[in-house]
Image (cartoon, rainbow, N blue to C red):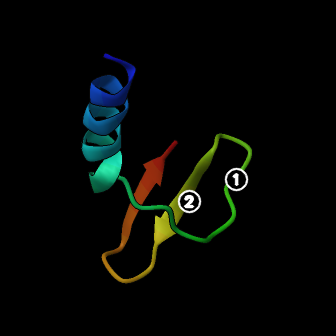
Amino acid sequence: MTIILTAVLACASGGVWAHSGGTDSQGCHMDHKTGIRHCH
């Protein structure tokens, strides 16, 4: 059961990509390629 749960969680987290860049005091930053500000 543990192996199945681990496999499911590993597959579910595959779509999450980290990126570099500092955040401001509100935890947000600007994506200069798209011009969109987003927060974490």
In the image, residue 39 above or below residue 18: above
The answer to which of 32 and 17 lies nearer the viewer is 17
Indicate which disc residue 24 carries. 1
What's the amino acid at mark 2? His
Q: Locate residue 3, reporting x and y percent.
A: 35, 29
What's the amino acid at mark 1? Asp
Q: Locate residue 4, reporting x and y percent.
A: 27, 27
The answer to which of 5 and 19 lies nearer the viewer is 5
Image quarter where the N terminus lies is top left
Q: Residue at x 60, y 71 (%)?
A: 20
Q: Residue at x 30, y 76 (%)?
A: 34
Q: Residue at x 63, y 69 (%)?
A: 21
**Going by the picture, which residue comes out furthest to the bottom?**
33
**Going by the picture, which residue comes out furthest to the right?**
25
Q: Locate residue 19, reporting x and y percent.
A: 52, 68
Element at label 1: loop
Residue 10 quadrant = top left
Q: Is residue 6 left or right of residue 4?
A: right
Identify the residue position indicated by label 2 in the image: 29
Find the distance from the CA under tag 2 to the CA under tag 1. 6 Å
Q: Residue at x 52, y 42 (%)?
A: 40
The answer to which of 6 and 1 lies nearer the viewer is 1
Near mark 2 (Cα within 10 A), the count class, few <14, some 14-19 or many ≥20, is some
| Badge 2 or badge 1: first in the primary sequence | 1
User: Are the residues flagged by discs 2 and 1 in contact, CB closer than 8 Å?
Assistant: yes
Near mark 1 (Cα within 10 A), the count class, few <14, some 14-19 or many ≥20, is few
Indicate which disc residue 35 carries. none
